[in-house]
Image (cartoon, coloured by chain):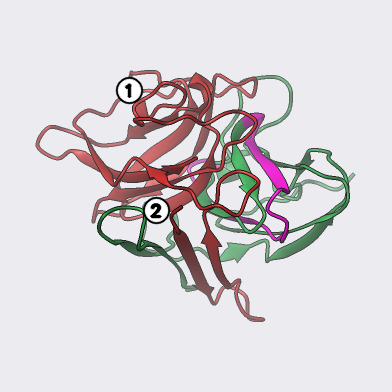
Amino acid sequence: MATITAQLTVNSDISSYGGPSISKTMTMTKAATNNGLERTSGIQRKYLTAANEVDLIQGAAGVVADMTVSATASAAKIYIKYIESDTSKYVTLSLGNASTGSSLTANDSNGAHMELGRLYGDDWMIIPWDGTSATGDICVLPNEATTAAPAIIEYIVFFD
Amino acid sequence: MATTTAAITLTSADLLTDALSLSATKTLHKAGSTVGLDQTTGMTKAYLTAVTQVDIFPTLIEGSLAFKNKTSWVYICNESEDETEYAIVKLSGNVIGKLYGGDFLWMPWSMAEDADADNKHADIQLTPSVATGMWFTWCCVNEGTEYPTSV
């Protein structure tokens, strides 16, 4: 059993009353237990050389080796960072089926695709992940990406 | 100009044969700029006592033109101390994942338009696993807030 911790700190002066501020540590455990997650994709880097929407991380029998999440008992976590110093560039993250084209698959609340949000240069995120079907795929669409100047995405998956 | 900084540290001494240590820090900016985000819902602390799916940011107009191409960041934490209690987090009906007791998420949120006519927009939805009461905290840091018109 491994011990994996994620410590989040957010400091802000938006409110004159203070904050919002966050200081939280999460120990990643298997679903409904106190046993630590013990499998990982390892830290991955994906170089995208075209501005097309593609799967970054596939659920079910996808690219995460040995991954056996289930719809009823998944406590997987994903960390993703857009490695880019230019903060005007961004990648759009979505759940579902990638279009493989230069436009996002149409958003559909019935499960085929839904845009999550944008990571601008150097932004990062951490989310739990269902990952049990194609509609749980994590898709990414860079607004700019070429062979000479690829969009570089760093990610790691921790799973049951 | 307001300044909001988010930092994460991922560590494990025994997951791999060598220690895992990964850190990242980012100042949150308005979309495509270096101007700091300046609006927030504030931190909500909620006690949910039903296994009913709820929209946790009902005061924001998801998918409205005001939010188009804007930046928002969302924090949600399941404050339960019971490791068996979880909440399913969805984005407009699409499952993101489960937050078990003590788990949190930090993610960008596009509030994107939904082509489907079921009026879910880009709601962030939370469904507790038990009706015996679960504590949650959540917050949105954003730009371009638009509130629903009163009826």
Asked if residue A34 is positioned above or below residue A76 in the image, the reply reads: below
- Chain identifier, colour red: A
Disc 2 is placed on an element classified as strand
User: In the rendered image of this protein, which colour is used for chain B?
Assistant: green
Asked if residue B23 is positioned above or below residue B65 in the image, the reply reads: below
Front residue of B100 and B41: B100
| Residue A146: % across, % down | 16, 33
Q: Amino acid at mark 1?
A: Ser
Q: Which residue is mark 2?
A: A124
Residue A51 part of the magenta segment: no
One can see residue A96 in this view: yes
Q: Quadrant of residue B53?
A: top right
Q: Residue at x 56, y 46 (%)?
A: A30
Span of residues in magenta: B68-94
Label 1: few (<14), some or many (≥20) within 10 Å?
some
| Residue A152: % across, % down | 23, 43
Q: Which residue is mark 1?
A: A102
Residue B70 part of the magenta segment: yes
Q: On the rendered structure, is B100 left or right of A93?
A: right
Disc 1 is placed on an element classified as loop
Asked if residue A16 is positioned above or below residue A111 in the image, the reply reads: below
Q: On the rendered structure, is B72 left or right of A54?
A: right
Q: Residue at x 23, y 56 (%)?
A: A85
Farthest residue to the bottom: give it: A17
State the CA–CA distance, disc 1 to disc 2: 23 Å
Image quadrant containing the C terminus of chain B: top right
| Residue A81: % across, % down | 34, 50
